[in-house]
Each structure stands twice: as C-alpha cells, then as structure tokens.
Amino acid sequence: MVNYYHGELMPQRTLDQYMAKDLGEEIVGLFEVGKEGFKEIKSGNTFTILYVAEPKIRFRAHSSTIFPLDFRYLRTFYTSSKLLTADLVFFCKRENYDLVNKLFDVMKTFLSVNKGLGFNLDIDFKSVDDDPYNHVVKVLKDATEANSSNTIVGAATPRLGGGRYWLVKAYSIIAGIPTHIINTSRLSEIVQECKKKGVEPENCSGFTAYALNNLVQLYAKAGGIPWAPGEEGLLQDKVVIGLATSPMTQGYAVGVAYAIAYVGKEIRSFITSATIDVAGLDMDMVMSRGIYIPKNVIAQLLSKISEYVSGYRIRGYVIFQSPIVLEEEIEGIRSTLKGVPWILVHVKAHGFAKRVFDTNTDDWGPYRGLCVINNDYLDKFKDYGMIKALLLATGRIKLQRRSMEDVESKEELLYVGTPRPLELEIFVDKSHAKNYDPKTLTAYVSRLTLLLDKLDWEAYVRWPKEPFVIKYAKRIAQIIARVDDKTRETLLNVLSKRVFTHRYIM
C-alpha cells in the first residue's frame, strides 16, 4: 500500500511511524505578547505600531497557528469524529475524463488511507459528449426546493464565462443542492507544471495539493466543518457579519454572510441578502465616496439576523463591510442592536497607495500581524469612537516545522511582489467609547481579521486577505446582481423564506 506524505507517495511503514508522533508546524511570533494577544513595538508622533499574535484554529485532535496553509500533516477534520457521507454526481466531457479521474483517484486514496477524516465520498462519475454545464443546470432545475439528501452536483469545465457561474450558484440555492466546479484549464496547467519537473501528477505536490483543496471544499459542502476557531476569546458568543454590494441595472444588491460562534470553537455561517433602491440614496455622496448602506436596509438585515440568532447566547456583533460607512448606517445599527455591544469595521483591500516596509528584511517585506495605527485617532477615540489602522494580513512569517528527524526554522513569504496592507476603519458607539482601550480594540479586530481569513474552507493553500464573511457577502451580492430578472426574483424569494449556509455558494 502507498500513501501521501508531503504531497508525495510514501511507504505504509513510514506513515505508521509518522502517525505515531504529534508532528506539525507553527508560526513563531516575532515578539512575546501578553494575554491581550499583542505587543506595542514602536510609538512615534504620527503612528503606533502593534504586533498581534497569530490566531489559532482547531482540528479535532489539536490546534495550530499554521493550518490550513499546509496540508502535509492533516489527520482529522474538526467534525470528523462523526462520519459524514456525501454523494457527488459529477459530469465531465469524455476528453477530460482521464485527467479529472486522476484527481479523484488522489482524493479516494487519501480518504481510504486516512480514516481519521471520517468522510465517505461516493462519486457518480458521468462522461458526457456535450457541455457538462448543461447537465448540472438540468439536475438543479429538476430538483425540488429544499432537497434533503446529502447530494452535491458538479462538473469539470473550462472557466464558466458569460454569467454561467453565477447562474449555477443561484440554481444551487434555489434547488437546495451544493455545487462543485473543477476548472479543467487550471487542472491542465498544474499537470503541465508537474511534467516539466519530471514528476507524475499523483506524485507531484502541486497536483496533490489541488486534489486536497477540492477535498476540503467537498467536505464543507457536505455539511462538515474542516477546522474551527482554536481559542475562545476572539469569537465566543459573537455574531460576525460581512456586508458587500454589487451594482444591478436598477439599484444595488447587498450580499450578507454572517457567522455564529458558540463555545468559542464551532462556527456556523449563513447567507442572506437585500436590495437598495437608488432613489433613496444621496447620489452626491455615492458619486464622491461610493455606495453606502442606508439606515433602513441595515436595520432590516440586522433585524433578520437578530431574529435567527435569538436562540443563541450572543454577547456582541462584529460587522465587517466593503462599502463606506456613514453616520446614517451607524444610526441604523445603534437603533436595531439596542443594548448589545457592536463593532463596525470598514475593510479596504484595494484602491489606495499605502504600503508598509521593514528595512530589516532582505526585500524590505514586512511581517504578517503588524498593525500601524494613526495616532490622531488614538488621541480622539474617546470623543468619536473611531480608529484608522493598517493591518498586514499577508507578509513574512517565521515558520517552525517539526519532522520525525528534527525541528527546522525558516521564513516563508505569504505574498508575491510588495505586500498590500488592509486599511481598517473601526467604529464603536461613541457613547460607549470610554469603555474601550483603543489599542486593545484595534488588536482584537486585527486578530479577528487574521482568524477569519484562515476560516475560508475554499482556499486553504494561501489565505485570502479579507475575512471570509466579506468574501461570501461579495459573492452572494454578485450572484443576485448578475443573473437574469426571473432568476433573481426566484432567488430573492427563496432567500426570504429559508436560512442557507454559505456552502451553497462555495
């Protein structure tokens, strides 16, 4: 029998030796941090620089700072103590059958060897002569709403252009069946990269990583939790919400993804939506600063979420969003979440020229976890309840890797080119600002942001920069905005009647 280790095949005897030890790897912190999870490393006239501790995530057997960046030591999923079974109905053109089948063979071998993952994936592989997309759409359209079976429908196809991707995900919600698309163009590129190295795909780290990435997604789409928050303080008893917008022909779609964490570990995430009528917007503000979420829309959305989470013990809300923040929205939050603490964070990932450099590194690349705060906002926080900061969500990390032979320390780059920081605008109710220490608040939001980018089960190989709730809020907004009017009407109607987890749009 052969097994996968470090993305390659290894003998059973070696695997048994490896499994007997608690091997793994961790990000080594640059500085010792206290119980607050951060250390102030420099303070000048203009800026204060914090270093925040890398948040942990938890698998069933252990917690880690590095997972899911590297899959080499994966032995359990968070919910793998409960056996999960899924049926994948998968369509593929005959000409791509061998290529895609090889990908599934890697997944099957990994699952057969690693029983600790607790995942039975039954694949019904259907070869077709025409476009696999058509077969996926037919299955979804023929399915009844709120399908209760644990079925996933998928296809191997080149990049879905012309709005077809958005339609597939819209139909997925309407039918109540998760969908899984494999990009054959990308898969072919990976195979060619392996061949250039003189390595067969099944023994090639790039190919096996791609297979395992798909496996994680399928586990999540089947209703499992691959990994969860690894420490209680960041998410315990809180609702984390992501808000994003996308322009339609008439008005704007608002996508909402929100997550509920309880017992500080397990996390469940959901999607909902709304639309904005431009007639109710200040168009001068839209033209000068961009789209914003009006008071009545934020109140509507938060009321819906509050009603759903009423059965949970909720101690606060943290709202991340890509649209700009106006006082009108803050008023809507304040009036809806009466008596419940909240934090609102505007996350800007693009469109600004700010950069952070570290002259002590060979390429001046900064480290992930550095946070630069504008001192003007620190000084005035008690009066206005607002902070502006830059956060390095990508950057260098110091990595300590444990193998069966020794402990190896090295640095790894989580970026290509110059790292671009996230710009954070953090708001609290200014009448309660005196209850917060602004540096501790900024460190908390920064660590939560770093945690939420690691909780994206769709992209374990390289962590996304933004919190996953913003990513999926953007996706549901784009789905609503880019499908045809008839599909949009049906989709909005279904979303208004049911609560959907975000696995339907992964």
Image (cartoon, rainbow, N blue to C red):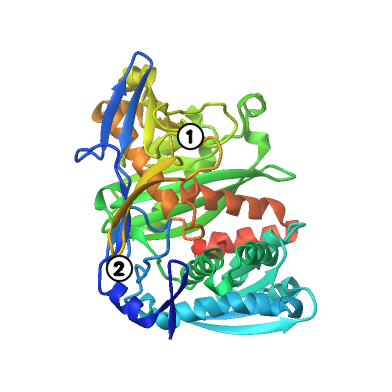
Choose between 196 and 28: the one closer to the eye: 196
Residue 302: x and y in percent read: 45, 47
Q: Which mark is residue 421?
A: 1
Is residue 27 visible in the rendered image? The answer is: yes
For label 2, count other residues whose C-alpha is less than 10 Å away and answer few (under 14), some (14-19) or many (20+).
some
- The vertical placement of 230 against 333, above or below, is below
Give yes or no for contact between labels 2 and 1 (Cβ–Cβ under 8 Å). Answer: no
Residue at 36% x, 54% y: name it. 66
Residue type at numbered disc 1: Pro
Residue 127: x and y in percent read: 71, 83
CA separation in Å, label 2 and label 1: 32 Å
Splitting the image into 4 quarters, where does residue 96 fall? bottom right
Q: How many marks?
A: 2
Residue type at numbered disc 2: Arg
Image position of 362 (left or right of 275): left
Furthest toward the left, the residue is 35
For label 1, count other residues whose C-alpha is less than 10 Å away and answer few (under 14), some (14-19) or many (20+).
many
